[in-house]
Image: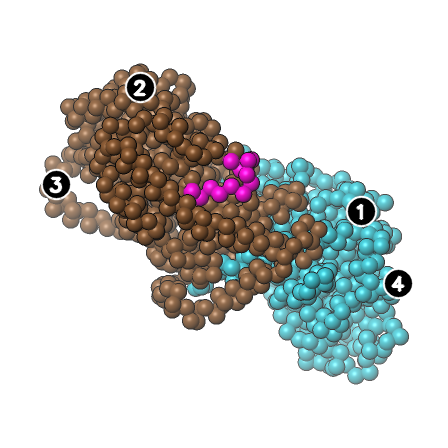
Chain colours: A brown, B cyan
Amino acid sequence: MSSEERDVGEPESCPDCVRVGLDSLALNGREGEKEGDDLGNGSVEDGVGGTVEGLGVNGVVAGVGGGEIEEVWDRNLVDGRREREENRGGEIEEVGDGRLGDWYKARAGGWGEIEEVGDEKLGDEHRANSEGDVEGDSSASSSGYAAEREKGSSHSGRSSASEEIDDGEAAMAAWVPGKRHLDEDEASISWRKRKKHFFILSNSGKPIYSRYGDEHKLAGFSATLQAIISFVENGGDRVKSVRAGKHQVVFLVKGPIYLVCISCTEEPYESLRVQLELIYSQMILILTKSVNRCFEKNPKFDMTPLLGGTDVVFSSLIHSFSWNPATFLHAYTCLPLAYATRQAAGAVLQDIADSGVLFAILMCKHKVVSLVGAQKASLHPDDMLLLSNFVMSSESFRTSESFSPICLPRYNPMAFLYAYVHYLDVETYLMLLTTSSDAFYHLKDCRLRVEMVLLRSNVLSEIQRSLLDGGMHVEDLPIDPVPRSMSLLSQLSYQRIATPTESQESLREAFTGTGGPAGLWHFIYRSIYLDQYVASEFSPPINTPRQQKRLYRAYQKIYASMHDKGVGPHKTQFRRDENYVLLCWVTQDFELYAAFDPLADKALAIKTCNRICQWVKDVENEIFLLGASPFSW
Amino acid sequence: MGLTSAANGGGDDGFRLCIFDLRRGLSEGQELDKILFFYPADLPFSTQLSVIGLSEGLITFTRIFSPDAACEEIEAECHSHVFYEAEPDIWMVMVVEKSKEKEAIWRLDALRKVLKEVHSLFVMFHGSLRSLLMKDPSGGSLRSQLFLFITDYLSAFQKRSPLDYCCWDFLVSKKLHLPSFRDSLKERGTIQMLTIGREAALEVQSLVRLVESCTGSTSCHSLLMFQDLLVSTTFSPDDTVGLFVYAVQRLIPRVLSTGLSSWSYLRKGSASSASFLGSAAGGGGPLTEQFYGSYDSFPEESRTSQIRPLQHEKWSKGKDGFLVNDSWRPENDNSVPSSPTIFLQKSDERMYFSIYQYKNLTLIFTVPISSIPNGEQGLSNVKQLILENASLKFSKVEEKLTKGWGGENAYHVSGYRYLLVDGDRNNSRASPPTKVATLSKESLLALNKLRKEVDLEKSRVRWEAARYDKDLEISIRAKNNAWVIARTTRGKELYMVLENANETVLYASDAVEKFSNRYCNGVFSLD
């Protein structure tokens, strides 16, 4: 069965969106395996079980599994969703709308001019809830909040990040993809205490996505958010943010889609707004902007089925907001590789790009090994971030080759491209993007060619080695000017040879708490021309996930401060607080962010920054993708 | 008249200021009862209610997540809304428009301080809003008091004094001028002290003791100012700030003699004030009457019976050197004294509020009404006693302070534009306005932005469970090559702009270090 046949077979009125909906549902089949209960459909699990091997992913891979089975699978999933929809949909609509009116009314008193319905139900509810909150503080053992509180109180206010461990956010290693805390809703104290909420809703107040809690239970809350946005809009204005104590609510309106973040993470408004933009773009990547048409046709259009099962994609993106500098730097990073190795990878990608592939991207985790674009086509770093997040977060891509429609929001938000994705090993994957929906076989051939060349030229094993070695370590920052020929990788191998593993480790341990020279702990260097950044590996004392996240947030803050829309960009910034000395230096060519021990000597720190820049220049062949960049056009 | 157009919407600058009580107007149809004050008063009630509705909605909404600290500000594309919970459930909200006019760039914490200031001044003269609502549950008398008081207060923002910004703004504008980025090197709600030598300090001390002993009351408090600088105070810190702010606005010689005050209004004659009030009150026509119907006698009765301490040109210097104000003129009702009175914080008792002025010296002292036998007559006796015993001392102190005073630019440090705030003592010192005015707009905007960042850090510290003092050092080299610097440590803050400075961070920190060692006892120095 070819993909066209499937297209024809689709019943809904919005073919673009629905197709993706189905595809992403198929993706979720894998989720279904894990969370069969959630889907409430045992047969789905069976169906999936029977088709895993044959179908590959998304049922688009023809010829291997039977079309029949595939259809059963899809239908089951869709039915499952529909059922769920029917069960709850009507109710939601009523609740949502009813409350919306109530909210207006309850809040406005005299807003009657605008909306003259309802009573004070929701207002009262809110009021009661906030009182309940206070009471809850003393008797919250059942909500799980008591445990949080205990944790919180055992630390000083400063380490309040500890509360977040509950979210799994702080512990990167322990981070579990997908949605958790489904049982929560706006009435749960634990839900209210979450440090960072994200919501997507439609302009009629229908919930589309919530980071925590079941969207359907949050219909009333969604309606409240919608009421706030539209109330301000009715006054001829547009609400951007609300601040209350440590909390900040940030709003983003994208046509019929509203996005809201509620956070007490101390991240600046600008950062949170960028995060909302990325979430929106992630949604566009899955659906394209043509989803707007569905809202034009039917303002009460329910989008949740279209995004069904993509929770993992969003939760993994949100998780990356607390560890991946690409999310605020708008740049990508490369896996460190010998120049020749990267050249070899680039050459084979260039070969296939010449045969009608729009973009060929070889990545290892979130790092680029090489990428090539067809002439004149340029790939925005944000698109790369979202694409790799989409691929990495969806378990199904890992198990077999896939061909999936995706949209690159910065490239063309209205149209689908087709992504052929194949994992070459556990961490390394090849993505081939094309405009043609029937290029699967061609791309498969391309992949085979690429894979063969990469294996033969040992690129894949080099990638593995680089993964193990890591990139730049602050401890290795040359203290005296090194001979320019010394490369990062030869430095690494030199160390490996010169010091047996044991003694190297003991050496590293001796460094514990000191980092690099002059109290240097970490740095990020961003090349403006290349749209790329390089971050040093985390070394002690920045070795726990919590410390890493705190540093990440500090970078985020100084980035926002340097790049203020009104008065920025500034040229230099020195910032010292109880945690760090941060130095930031922005020039036309690069940006450097460096973190030091808070007691670091200023003069030495400045010298060290100069040395970092020199070091980066010395090894730029290995840490950046040079020459092949399609961005400089 | 220009002022009229400002209030009437012809020149509507989008400015709104409202006070509402969440405990009132709870039932349907009674929503108007929430409103205690709204500026401009001539806006249709539907508009007023929509401002308050949004505010109330967001207060309720934010409490879901942040029960201890409800909504503080809303940033929208075209407006900023600043919230201040003045008293439990009594909220003040200011809405400012981000107009295309480029001067309209605010720091919301500075605007919030305006709200705090107007509230604390009101309480000083009238008592708390809640207590007035308890006395008159209809809210009528509170509304009329707030209306007069805040209208008088706001009229001060209608024009800027050329003395303040002589280098950039001689323009007389019809709009309200609120503290903007141009005021980044000022801190509202703090006092400015005069630095005096040991000898002068002893003289001042003995003068203060002498005056307080003349009152014969143990609960007499006094505050002495030289021009617009504080010399000494025996009031609590909060009361000191309130009285200082009021004195600078309405009492010091410069304000009295020329009709100018240091931060406002060139106003000659009371006509403009009356018209401002008139426009604010009358513009709304029937609507306003309907709303203020609960105290329909408002325009006439209130103008005679209400105290209007912020009304311009009301204070004048009597022959004996004591300032007089007929706002507190006797009424038929004998229960209210005709001499000016105020409330001090943490005390419900009314205090006689007396001001004596000798050349550049202004002395404020308060005595509990109860401690003066024979009321007004007793107070006159006290004043007489002070004149007899302390006149000589006043002239001596005045002479000494005048001699020691460095003039307008006494606190200028060349090469620096700075603001030094001591949060614990509520005082600040800054480069003179004329010097600050030489800074480029870019530098001031960058500083304003930096101050916003520091404000956020400070407010976070405030909400942290464990209190600790934020030790922060930020030096930014801005696009225009100026250094903008913020330092906070142990409750003290230092803000600085260095233009035409060397590019290295070391230069900037050396400059701070030098300044700190020389002028701040090394508080901001490292090690």
The span from disc 1 to disc 2 (Cα, nearest Å) is 67 Å
Q: Position of residue B1 (x, y in %)?
A: 85, 45
For disc 1, the marked residue is B8
Residue at the image position 60 percent from the left and 65 percent from the top: B198
The span from disc 2 to disc 4 (Cα, nearest Å) is 86 Å
- Which type of secondary structure does the marked residue at label 1 adopt? helix
Q: Nearer the viewer, mark 3 or mark 1?
A: 1
Please tell me whether residue A86 is drawn above or below residue B340 in the rendered image.
above
Residue at the image position 58 percent from the left and 37 percent from the top: B442
- Which type of secondary structure does the marked residue at label 3 adopt? loop
Q: Amino acid at mark 1?
A: Asn
- Which type of secondary structure does the marked residue at label 2 adopt? helix
Please tell me whether residue A8 is drawn above or below residue A219 in the rendered image.
above
- Are the residues tagged 3 and 4 within 8 Å (C-beta)? no
- Looking at this view, is B515 or B438 the one in front? B438
Q: Position of residue B457 (x, y in %)?
A: 49, 53
User: Which label's residue is closer to the chain start, 3 or 2?
Assistant: 2
Q: Position of residue B408 (x, y in %)?
A: 68, 50
The span picked out in magenta is A294-305
Tell me the crowding category of disc 2: few under 14, some 14 to 19, or many 20 or more residues within 10 angstroms, Cα based: many
Residue A108 painted magenta: no
Q: Amino acid at mark 4?
A: Glu
Q: Nearer the viewer, mark 3 or mark 4?
A: 4
Tell me the crowding category of disc 3: few under 14, some 14 to 19, or many 20 or more residues within 10 angstroms, Cα based: few
For disc 2, the marked residue is A353
For disc 4, the marked residue is B300
- Are the residues tagged 2 and 4 within 8 Å (C-beta)? no
For disc 3, the marked residue is A499
Which chain does the numbered disc 1 sit on?
B
Check chain identity for marks 3 and 1: say if they share one.
Answer: no
Which chain does the numbered disc 4 sit on?
B
The span from disc 3 to disc 1 (Cα, nearest Å) is 82 Å
